[in-house]
Structures are given as structure tokens and as C-alpha cells.
Amino acid sequence: MKQPRGFEDAQHPTHVCKLRKSIYGLMQSPRQWFQKLTSFLLNLGFTFSKADPSLLHLKQDDTSIFILIYVDDILVTSNNQVKIQQILQSLNSAFSLKQLGDISLYLGIQVIKTTSCYFLTQSHYAHDLLHNAGMSDCKPAPSPAPTKDQRSSDERSFADPQLFRKIAGSLEYLSIIRPDIAFATNSIYQHMHNPRNCDYQALKRLLRYVKGSIDYGLPLITGALNLSSYTDADWAANSTDRKSMSGYCTFLGPNLISWSVKKQTTVAHSSTKAEYRSLAAATSNILWIRRLPTDLDVPTTSPTPIHCDNTSTIALANNPIFHARTKHIEIDYHFISDHIRQGNIWVDHVCTNDQLADILTKALPINRFQLLRSKLTIHSKNG
């Protein structure tokens, strides 16, 4: 600690102010804590991952140790159980640790270990969310969002905007492992500044869906380590500003590991441009994910397939000729073709019925939604 500027005492140069609140309340405390913890690990021989600065790894002979840090929540794993205990003992000598053994709860996410997989769920958080919203006993809904012809037409301002923002804000954390509610949550966020009665009805519909799928989650199972991605866009989806919705999801073998739902920042002139922007976002995500397995001693050598259902977008990615219909597309989006030539990705056509990212760009009929949800491997912990 050091004295703030202007508060130094010449007669007592070593004196500092007495803290009257926890160190956690200070703005720089997370940075200082991270620096102290990682400095200790670096002295033990760990190195930072080039793909993720929160991941550190140590390699000694045939032993690999990985430590993942999120503030004061730490995950440690290794192919050598003895080495794990040695690292934990070293950490415990410098810091006060709560060694809880096998992972069961990390960042509020329950990790249930079964004979076939690790199952990630936030059922306890969903229970609390419904209770705080006063909808613990509500009637379950089969899908998180109504289709366009089912939406409420009540455009009047909602009477309690603060309540709307409080409940809607709580949904962001629930969508961490629930891509099936990602689109509906994103749509609700777009009306946080001035919610209407129809927006509150959409929020209640989403909470009713959470009620009916409260024990749903994402499994992590053993399987092949090949990457693949699906990307899609809904052109001019927003009826107010005519901006498009982009969505992509990425699989590592049978496991869904990454997804995104985002409204595009500018209006697209055509469906090809909207799809091309979505493809560019998926490519950026793939390039980052391809670097991560290298730190885990599982380098990715073959091109990663990105599945797209727009043939014009695929043709443009493979041959970005600036003719009259595509010359308005920003140059930075054309990095896709460079990575195709470098062998990092290849764009594959998939029919619309098999486009898994469709669930991330629009509200779907119940049967279609439930089919894609199952293909994204989202289900209850009982299967």
C-alpha cells in the first residue's frame, strides 16, 4: 500500500491510510491479485497460454499440468495425480486454499460427473431466478420465444421498467451454458432502455420455457477432437432498423464448445452480405479456438469446416471478386479467403434443414426448435 497523492505526511513518510473496506471493493484489486498469483506460478515454471491469458501450463517430461484462473476460482488438472497434489501444496503454502477435490461447482455452474460424461447445468440458479421473478409456479412453455405471428402487439410502455431490467439482466448469466435461450435473451436485451408490454410478455414466455427446462444443460463427453462450425444469418430480421442477426456454433468432436448471437452493426444490402458477415465472425472464432489445442498438445493440422447454407456466400468466400454486387463489402471481411488458401478453414454447403445455427438467429416453430436443440446436445441430466 502507498499513500494517495496529496496525503503524504513528511513527518511519517511510511504511514498509509487505514482501509475501512475490503480489498475486494477496490478497482485495482482483481489486477493486483491476478499478478500476485500468476507471478507465483511463473516462478514454479508455468507459462501463459498464447490463446488464453487465464490459462497457464507446465510441461515436465511426460507430465502436463494446466491451471485455469478466474479471479479466485481455480481449476487444476493434469495427467499425473501426484503432480497435482504437489502443485496444490505449493499453492497452499503461499495462499489460503479451499481444496474441494473433484470439481462440482465452478463460477456458479454445477458440474455433475457421470459414468459417461461431465454434465454442466445451472438448475439451482434457474430456480432462484424464477423465485425472484415470482414465477416459480408458472406454466411451462415448449419454446423460449413466440414466432412472428404469435407475438403480442401491445406497444404501450411497460409500467415498471426497473423490474424488467432486473429480471432480464439475470438471464445473461443463465445463457452461459444454454444456447437454446441465447436468441430470445438477445432479443429481450434490445429493449432494456424502453421496455413495452409486448417485451414483458416475451420475457415471461422465456421464463416459462426456463421453468419447463430447468434441469437442462450441456454434456461433455469423450470423442474425436475435430473442430467444425455452423454459421447462419437472418437478413433484415429487425423490423425497426432492418439490421440482420448473426449466429454461429462450434463443436469439438461431439461437444458444443462455443456459440454466438449478435445483431449486426450495420444494415446489409443483401442476404449474401449478411451471411458473409456471419461467416467472417465464425472464422475469427475458429482461428482462436485452433490455437488453444496447440497449448494442450493437440495441434489442429487439417482445415476446419464451416457449414453455411448460402451458396452465394460460399462462392464469394472462395473467390472474392469485386464486381458490382459485392464491391461495397468491407475489405476486412475478405480475410476469409486468405485463411481458406492457408488451409485453416474450408467452407462447406449444408442444406437449410441441417443448419444448426438456425436456432441462434430467429424464433422457430416448436418442432423445429426442439429438433435443433437436441442436435446441439442440450438435454436434461437424465437424458
Image: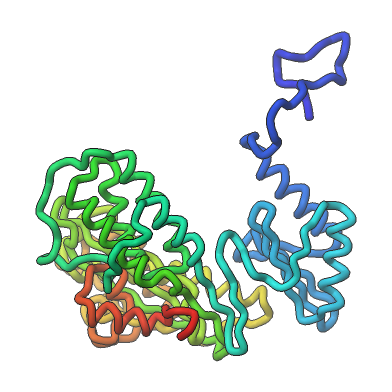
Q: Residue visible at 45% across and 73% down?
A: 215
Q: Looking at the image, what colour scheme do you see?
A: rainbow
- Image quadrant in which you'd find residue 248: bottom left
Vertical side of 44 occupied by 377: above or below? below
Q: Is residue 2 above or below residue 200?
A: above
Q: Position of residue 169 (x, y in %)?
A: 39, 49
Residue 262: give x, y in percent of width and height.
33, 60
Along the line of sight, the residue nearer the viewer: 139 or 65: 139
Res 132 visible:
yes
Which residue appears at 57% of the width and 68% of the height? 110
Q: Residue at x 85, y 71 (%)?
A: 85
Q: Give residue 147's position: percent from left, percent from top.
A: 17, 68
Count the marks: how many?
0
In the figure, 343 relative to 44: above or below? below
Q: Is residue 326 left or right of residue 116?
A: left
Q: Quadrant of residue 80?
A: bottom right
- 345 horizontally vs 323: left or right: right
Q: Quadrant of the N terminus?
A: top right
- Which residue is found at the position 21% from the left and 55% from the top? 201
